[in-house]
Structure formats: structure tokens, C-alpha cells
Image: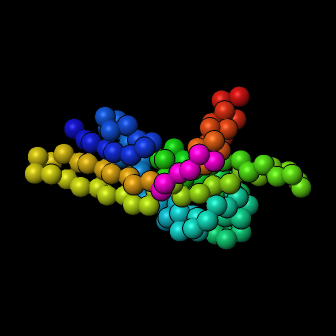
Amino acid sequence: MARWSSDEIDESDESALPPVLQSLDDSTCREILARLNEPKSANDLREDCDLSSSTVYRKLELLRESALVREYTEVRRDGPNVTLYERDFTDISIGIDDTGEFSMTVTRPETDPEDRLATFWSAMKEES
């Protein structure tokens, strides 16, 4: 049995650890996470990491499914809207106790109401 704690990962969901470990085991995912010290578009990441667009989007999807990256749309008055990505954790701890039970704790950055609203609209966009 495994335990997880985080805002996004259900503590009772034993399937949460493998995607996180898979993401962290991938050198391209780690490079993207390292470059996300501030919100960036997929195009910015493509240029920063010298990767193809398809690779960037595939890795961002894996990181998003692992709840390690947050995606939101920035509405711009002076041009087209842009989808931005940002790292959505400050610390990940994985442990094992004497009984062989794994635990994972993902610490999230503080979010303000504006961030929560952006997340809400991004989720609405996905559902439509």
C-alpha cells in the first residue's frame, strides 16, 4: 500500500507514484522542469531546450499528467492568447518505511486567487 499527499494527487491513489517517477527519470522532462523557473510557452521551451515541438508537447503532457507542471492560458489584449506552463511543485519527497510501504509528498507553491482562476479556466478549456 502507498500513501501520497499533495493538492493534486489523491493520497489513496497508488497509481500516482509511477508517473511521477517516470517523469523524473526522463532527462528531457528534467531539463524542461529546470527551465521552468518562470512560466514559459511551449515554443520558448522548444527553443531553450533545442527540441522538436512534438517532443516538447509530449513531455509537457507527461509532466502535466504527473501533476508536476501546471498549464494555463494568458489572455493578451495586444495579440493572440498564449498557453503557458509552470512548475507546480517546490519539493518532492519519496520514502519507504520498515514494512515496505512507499510514501510520496509533493509540496506545492502557494497560489493566489488569480492563479486559481487561471487554473479553472484552463480546465474549462480542456473539457470543451
**Quarter placement of the C terminus:** top right
Can you tell which quarter of the image residue 118 is in?
Answer: top right
Relative to 82, does residue 1 appear above or below in the rendering?
above
Task: Examine the rendering and report whether any part of residue 63 can be seen.
Answer: no
The residue shown at (71%, 65%) is 44
**Percent position of residue 59, x then y:** 57, 54
Task: Examine the rendering and report whether any part of residue 39 can be seen.
Answer: yes
Task: Please state which of residues 128 and 57 is positioned toward the viewer in this rendering.
Answer: 128
Q: What is the number of callouts on the image?
A: 0
**Percent position of residue 95, x then y:** 24, 55
The residue shown at (38%, 52%) is 106
Can you tell which quarter of the image residue 46 is in?
Answer: bottom right
**Quarter placement of the N terminus:** top left
Relative to 45, does residue 77 appear above or below in the rendering?
above
Q: Main secondary structure of the magenta part?
A: loop
Which residue reaches farthest left? 98
The residue shown at (64%, 61%) is 39
**Percent position of residue 70, x then y:** 57, 50
Relative to 26, does residue 80 appear above or below in the rendering?
above
Q: Which residues are magenta?
A: 109-114
**Percent position of residue 84, x then y:** 68, 54
Task: Please state which of residues 115 and 97 is positioned toward the viewer in this rendering.
Answer: 115
Task: Please state which of residues 36 and 23 is positioned toward the viewer in this rendering.
Answer: 36
Judged left or right of residue 95, residue 97 is left
Colouring style? rainbow
